[in-house]
Amino acid sequence: MYKATRFYVLFSLLLSVILFSGCAQTEQRIVSLSPSQTEIVYDLGLEDYLVGWSKYDCYPPEVQERKGWLPYDDYKFVSIEDELQKDVAVVSYFTKINYDLIKELDPTLILAIDPIQKKMADSLKVLGYNVLYFHPTTVEEVWEMLVSIGDETGVGARARRLTEKARKEMKELQEITSALPKVKVYFEINHYGPYVLGSGSPMDQLLEIAGGVNIFKDVEGLAFKADHQDIIDRDPDVILTPLWPHAGRYEVTTVREIVTRKGYENITAVKNDRVYHYDSSLLKCPSLRQVTAARKLAYLLHPYHFRNPENSVSPWELGKIDATYPPEKPLK
């Protein structure tokens, strides 16, 4: 009799925990203010709890299948009522947010990233919202960010499994590249300026993991304006310039524009025809895809030692800027 009663009590407690956890999950209403945070929400299996995101969100492919989604260049705000009819409302334009719409959505958690969003995150906290703000400066801090979000949303165990796998894959990649000659890289953030990649960011570390050396590793900062003569003097082996889905013709630059810049004919990368476009939506997105980004860089820098990673457009496709870009179907 005692054993039966004890079993019943334990069973009841376990059932209560399961039911409570289920209720806590269904009550979650998550708002993501950036594409990378949306990716993480999907990585953690929490996409059904997304109620708000940014107009720049396009990955994973399932994002584009949600009712009401539009490419960022086609999106236009109509009304709060219109947004509430969508599967996920557009609340963020990355540098600004729709406070009235966020109020209507009544989120249980808001995710923000990057110093650009720090003031917005602080203002939302003052309004009483539960906000997680991140500014990862290393790849390790990206993994820690995933775990923090996982813990907050009740899927910490899943987050730890995913990040441990990512750490292992990164370590294996770096063990290979550490034995290869270092490739000097000029990483262009934006051709206006030009603005270039400095040190102290996950992207800078990805270059290192992939067997490259940032020619501006001595300058701290995610992006700063550089002098063309300084780029020429540092003589990179490879030049990388951004391209991304739905990019307009005037938002990106061509390989031709770069190789014909005054004095660039003397740069090793230009002499050896090693000026590439990189997928900005991949390399600039601190999420689990950092592993794919590192593999992509390793392939671009050491093509005889690595294959182009799966779910990554080829360098030839990245070199195209025409009406056929982006591909009809997003990569999975």
Image (tube, rainbow, N blue to C red):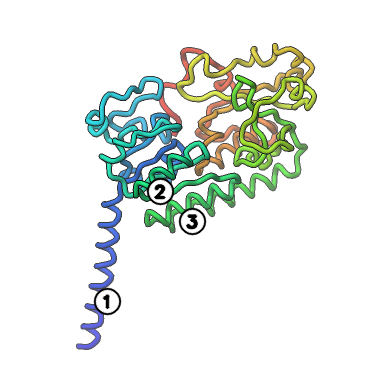
Q: Amino acid at mark 2?
A: Val
Horizontal side, residue 273 vs residue 145: left or right: right
**Along the line of sight, which residue is nearer the eye, 166 or 124?**
124
Q: Is residue 159 above or below residue 65?
A: below
Disc nearest the viewer among 2 and 1: 2
Disc nearest the viewer among 3 and 2: 2
Residue 10 badge = 1
Element assignment for label 1: helix
Query: Label 3 to label 2, Cα distance in Å?
Result: 21 Å
Horizontal and vertical percent position of residue 324? 47, 15
> Which of marks 3 and 1 precedes in the sequence?
1
**Along the line of sight, which residue is nearer the eye, 240 or 325?**
240
> Which of marks 2 and 3 precedes in the sequence?
2
> Which of marks 1 and 2 precedes in the sequence?
1
Q: Looking at the image, can residue 58 be seen?
A: no
Query: Label 1 to label 3, Cα distance in Å?
Result: 28 Å
**Along the line of sight, which residue is nearer the eye, 7 or 242?**
242
Q: Which residue is mark 2?
A: 131
Q: Looking at the image, can residue 298 be seen?
A: yes
Quadrant occupied by the C terminus: top left
**Along the line of sight, which residue is nearer the eye, 161 or 105?**
105
Element assignment for label 2: strand
Element assignment for label 3: helix
Horizontal side, residue 177 vs residue 32: left or right: right
Q: Which residue is mark 3?
A: 160
